[in-house]
Amino acid sequence: MEARDHLKNGAKPKSQTRGGIIYSINMENNKIFGVILLVIGIALAVYGFNIQNSFGSQLASAFGQKDNSATICIVLGVLAAIVGIILLANKGNEEKK
């Protein structure tokens, strides 16, 4: 019985599993999610650099206060951008199995 015949009879397609995790997201959703993460990551990194170079942050550091919000934004932005690039570069290895 072919897969199409099986679907015509009202049966649901089998989910692909890998390591016990069900992957139900198709490649188009991965690409969209990757683009969104890439854009958010770049925006967060730019925002973090702007905070780091702002007058208020420089004034606070002159008086010995440390502002970690800029560093957190930069690190999270870079990580989000890296995950977005990985999702965009994924060739769909799960779907080939």
Image (cartoon, grey):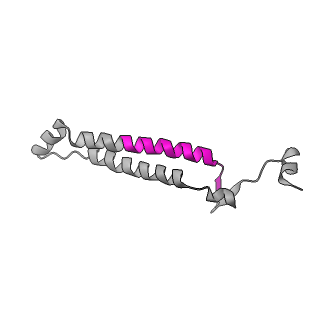
Asked which quadrant contains residue 97, the reply is bottom right
| In the foreground, 56 or 42 | 42
Q: Is residue 31 magenta?
A: yes
- Among all residues in the image, which is located at the extreme left? 63
In the displayed structure image, the side of residue 62 where residue 89 appears, left or right: right
**Number of marks drawn:** 0
Give the x, y percent position of residue 90: 56, 55
Compared across the picture, whether 72 is left or right of 41 comes to left
66, 79: nearer the viewer: 79
Does residue 27 appear left or right of residue 40 in this picture? right
Of residues 97 and 51, the one drawn nearer to the viewer in this rendering: 97
- Tell me where residue 46 appears, x and y as whole percent: 32, 42
In the picture shown, does residue 74 fall above or below 97? above
Q: Residue 17: x, y in percent?
A: 67, 58
What is the magenta range? 22-43
Q: Residue at x 38, y 44 (%)?
A: 42
Overall secondary structure of the magenta stretch?
helix
Q: In the shown orientation, is residue 60 left or right of residue 31?
A: left
Vertical arrangement, residue 22 with respect to residue 19, above or below: above
Residue at image coords 72%, 53%: 15
Q: Out of 62 and 93, give the one closest to the viewer.
A: 93
Residue at the (78%, 50%) spot, across then down: 13
